[in-house]
Image (cartoon, rainbow, N blue to C red):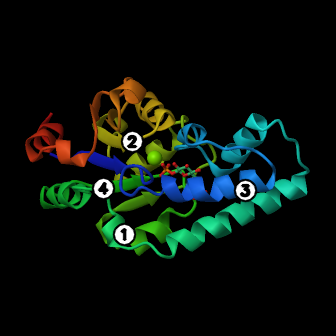
């Protein structure tokens, strides 16, 4: 029995949201915009372009196209400087156990992330070798909640979408998985991810038995 297991990156495998926050916050400050952690929540799973558009809208700011491009690359440079310091100690709890279990059971595994920096991050935390396919922000034309990212992953794994299982921490990502007709597993709070088929606070709550059921159902 083979299922396709698709992992989001930020908020599922590593907590890079804190680095996105630091970089967006500095950018917002340079524009005299007050940017809060609650607002940062709403940027989870959202593309870089869309994130900056949202921050500008919250701050009631309009800028030129050139300035927009410049700010985007500045933000990314700062973000990459945090990423450069990452190592495998930043992998979230029990992610290695779950990956190991799925590998033992010979289940195909893919990444399905909105980030254009996904490959760099997987290399930093030394997890790239476990993935049969990687689909990230460089490979898609339509951002989550569009299901494109997960449908491409299913195709690369050669698994029917209905036999795919998606681990996601964002509202947009769970919606994308549902729209793709995949089993959605929310990682986070039930209040936020109530539209997922299952919700767990983190991977420590996901037992081998549960994974086995997913494989065999
Ligand atoms: P980048 P995910 C998403 O990653 C993040 O949650 C989101 O906050 C970020 O804006 C987006 O990637 C784009 O990232 O600037 O690195 O291309 O959760 O889909 O893995
Ligand atoms: Mg995420």
Can you tell which mark lies on residue 128? Answer: 1
Residue wearing tag 4 = 109
Q: Quadrant of the C terminus?
A: top left
Judge depth for marks 2 and 3 and give the one in front. 3
Left or right: where does residue 208 sit relative to residue 62?
left
Q: Nearer the viewer, mark 1 or mark 4?
A: 1
Q: Which residue is mark 3?
A: 27
Label 4 and label 2: CA atoms lie apart by: 14 Å
Instruction: Measure the C-alpha gap from mark 3 to mark 1.
Output: 30 Å
Could you tell which of marks 3 and 1 lies nearer the N-terminus?
A: 3
- The reply to whether callout 4 and callout 2 are in contact (CB within 8 Å) is no
**Mark found first going from the N terminus, 1 or 4:** 4
Which disc number belongs to residue 168?
2
| Distance from the alpha carbon under mark 2 to that under mark 3 | 27 Å
Looking at the image, which residue sits at the far right?
64
Badges 4 and 3: C-beta atoms under 8 Å apart? no
């Amino acid at each position: 029995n083979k299922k396709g297991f698709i992992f989001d990156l930020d908020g599922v495998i590593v907590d890079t949201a804190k680095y996105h926050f630091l970089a967006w916050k500095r950018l917002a400050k340079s524009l005299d915009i007050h940017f809060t952690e609650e607002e940062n929540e709403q940027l989870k799973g959202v593309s870089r372009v869309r994130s900056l558009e949202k921050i500008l809208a919250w701050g009631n700011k309009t800028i030129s196209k050139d300035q927009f491009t410049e700010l985007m690359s500045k933000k990314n440079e700062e973000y990459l400087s945090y990423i450069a310091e990452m190592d495998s100690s930043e992998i979230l709890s029990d992610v290695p156990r779950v990956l190991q279990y799925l590998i033992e059971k010979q289940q195909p595994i893919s990444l399905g992330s909105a980030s254009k920096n996904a490959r760099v991050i997987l290399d930093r935390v030394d997890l790239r070798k476990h993935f049969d396919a990687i689909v990230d922000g460089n490979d898609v034309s339509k951002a989550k909640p569009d299901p494109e990212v997960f449908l491409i992953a299913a195709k690369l794994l050669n698994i029917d979408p209905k036999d795919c299982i998606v681990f996601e921490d964002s509202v947009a990502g769970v919606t994308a998985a549902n729209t793709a007709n995949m089993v959605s597993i929310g990682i986070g709070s039930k209040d936020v991810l109530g539209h997922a088929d299952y919700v767990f606070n983190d991977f420590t709550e996901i037992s081998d038995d549960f994974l086995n059921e997913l494989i065999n159902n």
